[in-house]
């Protein structure tokens, strides 16, 4: 019944353990799982932690003898939607698989912000970096140090942050590190096109 399907789907929400499909692209000793399976190997991919933030049921279609469940999922990177279909089918004792999959968000970009391959063009890093990382605006002296690969005074943000100059140009990715007992913001990636 629809109620049982909805009840089982609720169990997938939150932090869960998920076993990726044996025919996934996960590398095992440098070779993809699907290539190993197709070569006749028996493989065992361990479960991994994933987070399912939301599962919305768009429609349940009863097409005797099968049932199609149309869902929208908001999840962490590394989640296998095919595994959700498989595991839901197992929970319902009927088997399950995908008949369609459409990615509507590749963080932080929504599908309606995407272009076809023919219309694609590069987006300047400075236009999108603030959607991915916290931003630190740096002065010209700090920019010069970073472009030479040197560290600058520590940042108030923890983790990786983007360094942007006064002209709104992306300069580098920085991360606080302890060097000689001092905490400094150290470049971990420098935009080689910047002017020194």
Image (tube, rainbow, N blue to C red):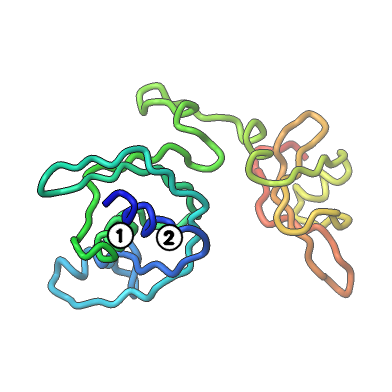
Horizontal side, residue 9 vs residue 98: left or right? right
x 78%, y 40%: residue: 196
Tag 1, which secondary structure? helix
Q: CA distance from mark 2 to mark 1?
A: 9 Å
Residues at circles 2 and 1 in contact by the CB criterion of under 8 Å: yes
The mark total stands at 2
x 30%, y 63%: residue: 87
| Image location of residue 46, percent across then percent down | 37, 76
Q: Which residue is at the far left?
A: 65
Name the residue nearer the viewer: 14 or 24. Answer: 14
Name the residue nearer the viewer: 101 or 53. Answer: 53
Mark sitting on residue 46: none
58 lies above or below 80: above
Horizontal side, residue 61 vs residue 40: left or right? right
| Image location of residue 188, percent across then percent down | 68, 57
**Label 1 crowding class (10 Å Cα cut-off): few <14, some 14-19, many 20+?**
many
Task: Identify the mark nearer the N-term, 2 or 1.
Answer: 2
Residue that label 1 marks? 88
x 25%, y 65%: residue: 90
Horizontal side, residue 49 vs residue 152: left or right? left
Residue that label 2 marks? 12
Q: Residue 91 is drawn in which quadrant? A: bottom left
**Label 2 crowding class (10 Å Cα cut-off): few <14, some 14-19, many 20+?**
many
Tag 2, which secondary structure? loop
| Image location of residue 129, percent across then percent down | 65, 39
Name the residue nearer the viewer: 147 or 83. Answer: 83
x 86%, y 74%: residue: 180
Q: Residue 27 is drawn in which quadrant? A: bottom left
138 lies above or below 40: above
Q: Residue 137 is drawn in which quadrant? A: top right
| Image location of residue 162, percent across then percent down | 72, 46
């Amino acid at each position: 019944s629809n109620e049982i399907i909805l009840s089982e789907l609720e169990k997938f929400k939150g932090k869960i353990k998920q076993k990726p499909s044996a025919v996934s692209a996960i590398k095992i000793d440098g070779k993809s799982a699907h290539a190993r399976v197709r070569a006749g190997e028996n493989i065992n991919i361990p479960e991994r932690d994933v987070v399912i933030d939301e599962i919305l049921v768009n429609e349940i279609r009863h097409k005797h003898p099968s049932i199609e469940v149309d869902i929208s999922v908001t999840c962490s990177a590394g989640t296998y939607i095919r595994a959700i279909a498989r595991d839901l089918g197992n929970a319902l004792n009927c088997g399950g698989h995908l008949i369609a999959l459409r990615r509507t968000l590749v963080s932080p970009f929504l599908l309606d912000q995407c272009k076809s391959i023919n219309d694609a063009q590069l987006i300047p890093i400075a236009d999108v970096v603030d959607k991915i990382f916290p931003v630190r605006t740096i002065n010209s002296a700090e920019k010069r140090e970073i472009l030479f690969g040197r560290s600058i005074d520590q940042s108030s943000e923890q983790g990786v942050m983007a360094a942007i100059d006064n002209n709104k140009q992306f300069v580098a990715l920085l991360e606080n590190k302890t060097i000689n007992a001092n905490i400094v913001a150290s470049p971990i990636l420098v935009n080689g096109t910047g002017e020194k």
